[in-house]
Amino acid sequence: MTDDKYSPTNEEFGVDDIVVNSNGVNYNKRSEGLSEDSNEFKDPSADGAGDYDSIHNIKLPFNPSSLLAENGSEVSNGRKQNDATDLRSNRPKRNTRWNVAPPPRNTQMTLKEQERVIDEIKKENFDLKMKIYFLEERLSKLGPDEVERASKEIRSDEMERALKAQIASLKSQLSERNDEVEEAYAELERMRGRPASVASSRESSSRLLNGEFSNQYEENLGQLRDKVAELTLQLREKIMMVDQLSLELEDLSIAHENAMHEVEEDWDRAESQMRNENVILREEIEQLQQEYDQILQELDIMHQSRQEDEARHQEGVEDIRVQLEEKSREISELQLSLEKAKRQTDTKTKENQDLTENSKKLKLQITGLEKTLYEKEEEIQELQSQLQSSVKEAETEDKLREEMISGLKEKLSQSKTKVAELTATQASSSKEIAYLKQEVENYSARILELEKANEIELEKSTAAKSRESHVISEKLKEKELHDKELERLRKEKKELEKTIDDLNEQLLAAQRRIAELEMAIQERDGDLQYVRQQLTNQTNRAKESAERYGKEQERLRTELDTHRQDLESLRSQVESLNDEVENKKNIILEHESEIKHLNAQRAKLNDKLANTENTRTKAEETYRNMQEGLRDKDSAIDELKTRITQLEDNLTQEKKHSTEMRTQLEEKNKNTDYERERVKNLEEQVATFMDEHKRLLEQIERRDATITKALNGLQMINQRKELMENALLRQMTEEIQSNLSSVGKRIAYQPPPYINPPWKPPGNASTLRKTSIKGHTKSSSIPKPTPAKSKKSTNSEIASPTPTVPTRLTSSASSDSSRTGSRLIPPKPIRESK
């Protein structure tokens, strides 16, 4: 048997019809139902010549082999030899002739639209696979015995036609011989039964004639008797052969009708089963599609929430920058106030009375500064409380996200199980197909060749897939590196925020130092100058740290811009891949239009075949009319014989008349020969029509091969699309996990150590202890800040956890303390928020 072919249509995939001929088994389009297609298998004994002459192949007006050869592909036996042919499923392939570039698009399709289009293509591909499965099941039921039986029926039909023609010629010869014998017998009877009066009157002439013609008549009579005996023997033999052939034809017709009835029943059962299974599978696919769309919507919502969190984080950074600027302005105001105090102390040295008054003024200013410091500390406490509340909100949001992710994972696992079940059903169907194909022993060599070609093509496709997967893995690695870089930058940003907090603490320490210096103004003017110098150093350090923070922020912004550009490039690549998917979709639509065109041509060829059958029936009718004409001629010959019997008076006239009749009979025989030649010519024309039908069916098979290639190309597109989906899902899950891990980390805040009032020189332990006790009592008099929190800081805390204190700041603080020789007092740590 040959390979099973099919030609899908644009409608809801009607099942093809099987036609048995001498070349094998082909699938023709079922256009008018099983009842009409079963007429192709009717009993040839019902008609004179049978209908198996019409079961040949039709020829197309163009040659698909030449079209395929233009594309650089080899064609063998009307089938394009491409290495991507899959014997187990006969998945269609793409014909490169119709790869026309799609028209330019003004707008690009979204991911959801592309997913919808790809899902529709998957549904069509699944319908085609189911159709292939049921067609192969039908093909397995038509075994080699039935094919041989059909070929025997065709050969017996041809033999029957040849025997009928031979019998007709023998009958005509026999009728001619019988006419001659009857004429001879009639002449003898007339000569014997003449009355005596006629014999006496013509005695002299009869003697002469008897002497001349008696010998001739006897010889002719003997020859005619011998010929009649031979012809009767031949006629009996032919009649026996005809009887045997008629019995064989009856047996074959009965077996054929039984086989057709079984085929129709199997076909009905397979069709109903296929429809039921198709409905169930479509419902399952629609359900899976709905679940997949829900998962995509949830992922989009999570992506939007992530973008909103990033925007909130940027707003929090801007708020912190504004607070830093406010702190710097306050420091500048304090410096101005200190300069005013310096000028006032200079005037106090000149006049002792003015010194007391100026000291009172300074005390008033110090109390005002303490009030401002107290207000600032209250603001800081509020900010800390707001931070804690934002941390709690972030934790609740993290829990909700984890629950959403777990639900999505469960849905994905359910969809995977359903896909596994569908693949299992498909695997079972493929096993049945493989089992059926093992029964085809006559074409095992060809199947091995195709399998070798398929292995080569599969190696090529796997190499291409590995290259594509390598490229995708490289892109994923690049994206992971970018994500790591973003995380590092976020950590640096948090460290900078920590440095800002350290600077705020240093500012508080400086303010405390200012208070202590103002209390010790009366003791020593030199101590006041030293304190002023230390304050200027601290302000310079704060300015330098603020400048460094601004530079770091600018650097972070530039790196964020570069990462955003990289993300845009990746998105453009994804959009280009989507464009490729849409191009493949357009190519598939073009192939569907080509299939429609081929179906229209098939309908035309079927009409042409019907016309040829009509011409054949007309030729048979003409042949029957000719036989009736021959019978009329036989009746005319009988009439002439009666006239010869009536003309007994004149033998010479009768002989002349008989010779004339013989000439007329010869002319009529010539006419009959001419009519027979015409009938033969008509039969040859019918044979040419059948050959053309055969060639057209071969071309249709070649077209079906091109369609298989197109569908194999569609399978490659689906595989690429699945790889892209997996990559996108992996990317989104990694981003969500990175965000969750970054939110989950909260580091304890530890401010830098305070520097004691540095106006006391090193070396005297008692003085150092006294100054440290004074500073401790003074700092204890100031109320401790309570944690506060703002709405804007919550988003920044969600996106970036608080890092540890940088080592360079602690080292700088330690170096300052070693230079001044002051004692370090560790502050109370703030508890870590869970």
Image (tube, rainbow, N blue to C red):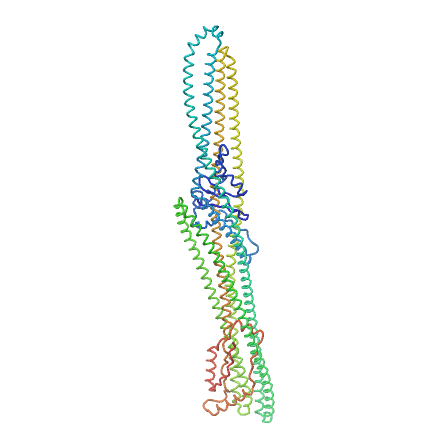
- Percent x, y for residue 324? 55, 77
Note whether 689 is above or below 220 in the view shown: below
Given residues 628 and 364, the one toward you in this image is 628
Note whether 692 is above or below 373 in the view shown: above
Does the image show residue 42? yes
- Percent x, y for residue 165? 46, 28
Query: Residue at position x 40%, y 20% from top?
Result: 226
In this figure, what is the number of numbered marks? 0
Q: In the image as oriented, which residue stretches furthest toward the bottom?
A: 352
Does the image show residue 96? no
Q: Quadrant of residue 441 in the image?
A: top left
Note whether 388 is above or below 242 in the view shown: below
Given residues 529 and 478, the one toward you in this image is 478
- Percent x, y for residue 756? 50, 86
Given residues 655 and 824, the one toward you in this image is 655
Given residues 281 and 392, the one toward you in this image is 281
- Percent x, y for residue 1? 43, 43
Note whether 292 is above or below 452 in the view shown: below
Q: Quadrant of residue 794 in the image?
A: bottom right
